[in-house]
Image (tube, helix red, strand yellow):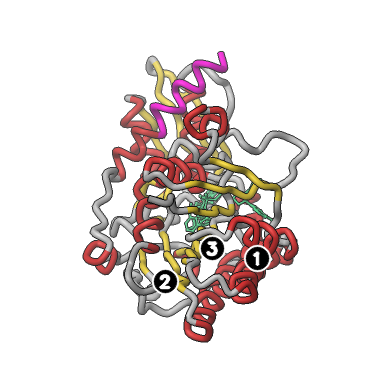
Amino acid sequence: MKKKVALITGISGQDGSYLAELLLKKNYVVHGVIRKSSSFNTGRIDHIYVDPHNKTNFYLHYGDLTDSNSVYNIINNIKPDEIYNLGAQSHVGVSFDNPEYTAEVSGIGTLRILEAIRFLKIKKIKFYQASTSELFGETYNKNIFNENSKFHPKSPYGVAKLYSFWITSVYRESYGIFASNGILFNHESPRRGETFVTRKITRFLTRKILGSKDILYLGNLNAKRDWGHAADYVEMQWRILQQKKPEDFVVATGNAYSVKQFIETCAKVLKIKIIWQGKGINERAYFINNNKKELLIKVDKRYFRPNEVHYLKGDARKAFKKLRFKPKFNFKDLVEDMIKHDLELARSEL
Ligand code: NAP
Ligand code: F7E
């Protein structure tokens, strides 16, 4: 049987690396788009690239979502069965500093792919768009968001992704392209970028218990997120494209925890005692070690965003039913997986 061919933008990112592994296990030929960078940016996929089993199944191409020709040429050369558009400037905080670039990559980048599919008239292509809970943004009475909830993005990233969400839907309706949005809530893993809050915390705490003298500076400790595991969520990305008809799905756990609760769960897993003192900008966490109190975490307003999404919790009943979504990791499993990985990493750095 002919192998299915998938193209992944953002293959060097957290989700891209897990998705590539999953599709290779499913016997796909996987092509990925990587960007030119002055330093190595393939750390998450090097193990796949060097594996001799993948010699004829795994290919990387230089391209960029801001470069229409590169997008068009890659799609035209590969003629994939499935395209997963995971490439993005994905950091909400950074999007306030680089709003135009974020719009180009995370918004218009999606249009560039859809236009290539339309222009090339490759009917078989199924397109997955990495949409996000940041589309919801504003929380009305701590509600729980599903596919019918109102969008109210609160960052340039959220707005860029809103454009991508709608242009995906418009190309589906207008040209009959099989194009679906996965509206995924936060998902983390040991491969999460180190400037996202969960990984920033697990990297810091695991170094700390091995003797680091550093202090961690964080922004809003009270923001709540619905955190799942990236390995579970990429499986849903694949399942969304295996449906008979293109549809949009929310993928979430249905549980929300604050940044502070994330820290406390890490502390439990590491079996360390921390106490909190002060309020607001003066809130601090201390590490109690041999009855001595050592400063651990300080709030730093440089990490506050001009506009914050305070609370996100998803209702994934549609995915539970239609995609048979059964996450393997709960919140504690996720924290344990990240801590275990980062402890080993911290030990290797000693
Ligand atoms: P990530 O780790 O930040 O990965 C983003 C990927 O996009 C990287 O491979 C990056 O390449 C690539 N990229 C950045 N700019 C690009 C450009 N101009 N052209 C081509 N590629 C570019 O993100 P992630 O966590 O894996 O998320 C995957 C996708 O899901 C993103 O679209 C994100 O916005 C969306 N999403 C994420 C979450 C979440 O909680 N993780 C939730 C909902 C939606 P480099 O490695 O070279 O930087
Ligand atoms: O922030 C607060 C911050 O940057 C989570 C992306 O994958 O998920 C991600 O976006 C919360 C926010 O993720 C720090 O203010 C406190 O309230 O880890 P984050 P995010 O903004 O939720 C969505 C679904 C995506 O689509 C995005 O691509 O934590 N926070 N202190 C902090 N955040 C960071 N980064 N750094 C801090 O020091």
Q: Which numbered disc, 1 or 3, marks the residue closer to the eye?
A: 1
- Residue 349 is a magenta residue: yes
Q: Residue furthest right?
A: 38
Q: What amino acid is at disc 3?
A: Glu
Name the residue nearer the viewer: 240 or 81: 81
Whether residue 154 can be seen here: no
Name the residue nearer the viewer: 223 or 113: 113
Residue beneath label 1, please? Answer: 109
Residue beneath label 3, please? Answer: 308
* Mark 1 touches mark 3? (CB < 8 Å): no
Residues in magenta, as a range: 338-350
Cα distance, mark 3 to mark 2?
A: 11 Å
Looking at the image, is 116 positioned above or below residue 66?
A: below
At 65% from the left and 65% from the top, the residue drawn is: 109
State the mark number for residue 204: none
On screen, residue 93 versus residue 48, left or right, reads right
In which quarter of the view is residue 102 placed? bottom right
At 24% from the left and 52% from the top, the residue drawn is: 326
